[in-house]
Amino acid sequence: MAASGPWGDERVMKLPCDFSVQTERSYWDRNVTLDLSGYRQFALEIFVSDPGAVSRFTIYFRSGSGWYGNGVSLTSPGWQTLYFSRRDFSVEGTPAGWEQIDGIRLSPWKEAARDTFLAVRQLRAFVPTVFIVRDTHTADDRTVDRTTKLIATWLGRYNVLAGTIDDVDVENGYLQGSGMAILPYNSTLSDASLAQLEQYVAAGGKLMVFYSLPERIATLLGIQNVGWTQGDFAAYSFNDDVIQYLPARVQQASWNITIAAAG
């Protein structure tokens, strides 16, 4: 631990990286006893002294005889927050499960043969306010992946941190604790998912839904599907002064639309 340095006057965990002599990486381990099964996102506050010396930073959670690991690139100097989504962790060995985490490893990887250091001050696990739900039952994986990443990118531009979970996670109740669920391209929602979404909305959760409008989802949104039409649509406009920040016009690049009315 260190009390002050280039990162400021605060107590941090300093991670010296002797990359002038090390061949691959440095790492630090700590034994813990944690149940992380209820969390989908992790955030680590880190100070980067020399990003050119570090190729990637990986966080590992040890569970029994295996590990969960997730790495990100370090491109900027100074204080920053690294986010790790649980669905992006890879598996090494045979971990016992997220409910049996017994170790944490922090590991920066070498990029250049020069010494540097990192500093960390907070690692937290949390449930995001917004979840994007990925359809795993679809035959169109490519469109699902593209649409899911697009929505996440858009939200990120406005500093809205959104976690991504699968519809199987929804079936298992993982929306609990969040404020909004976004369905970007979910054409094959199971009865179990729909039942969980109904419970979620009844408990105060909000929905944002694109593309498909199943009857049970329409009911949750307070609308009804009254038709469908094809056409060469360019945009749609809003005429409502009540909803704050509502855009006047939104591009519409689809060749068909669902006609909806108040439910």
Image (cartoon, rainbow, N blue to C red):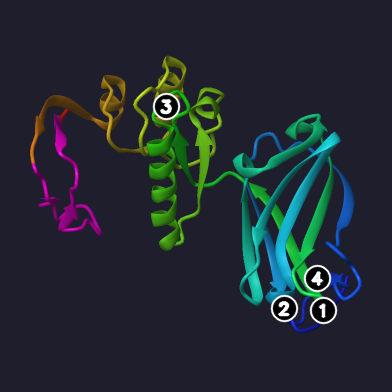
Q: Disc 4 marks which amino acid? A: Val
Up-down: is 214 above or below 17? Answer: above
Circle 3 — which element?
helix
Residue that numbered label 1 is attached to? 114
Residue sitting nearer the eye, 196 or 20: 20
Q: Disc 3 marks which amino acid? A: Leu
Q: Which residues are magenta?
A: 232-261
Which residue shows up at 85% across the image and 71% down it? 17
Residue that numbered label 4 is attached to? 12
CA gap between label 2 and label 3 equals: 45 Å
Kindly tell me whether residue 205 is visible in this rendering: no
CA gap between label 3 and label 1 equals: 52 Å
Q: Callout 4 environment at 10 Å: few (<14), some (14 to 19), or many (20+)? A: many
Verify CB contact (< 8 Å) between mark 4 and mark 2: no
Q: Is residue 169 left or right of residue 48?
A: left
Q: Position of residue 90 (x, y in %)?
A: 69, 41
Circle 2 — which element?
loop
Circle 4 — which element?
loop
Kindly tell me whether residue 58 is visible in this rendering: yes
| Mark in front: 2 vs 1 | 1
Residue that numbered label 2 is attached to? 50
Q: Is residue 234 magenta?
A: yes
Residue that numbered label 3 is attached to? 197
Q: Disc 2 marks which amino acid? A: Asp
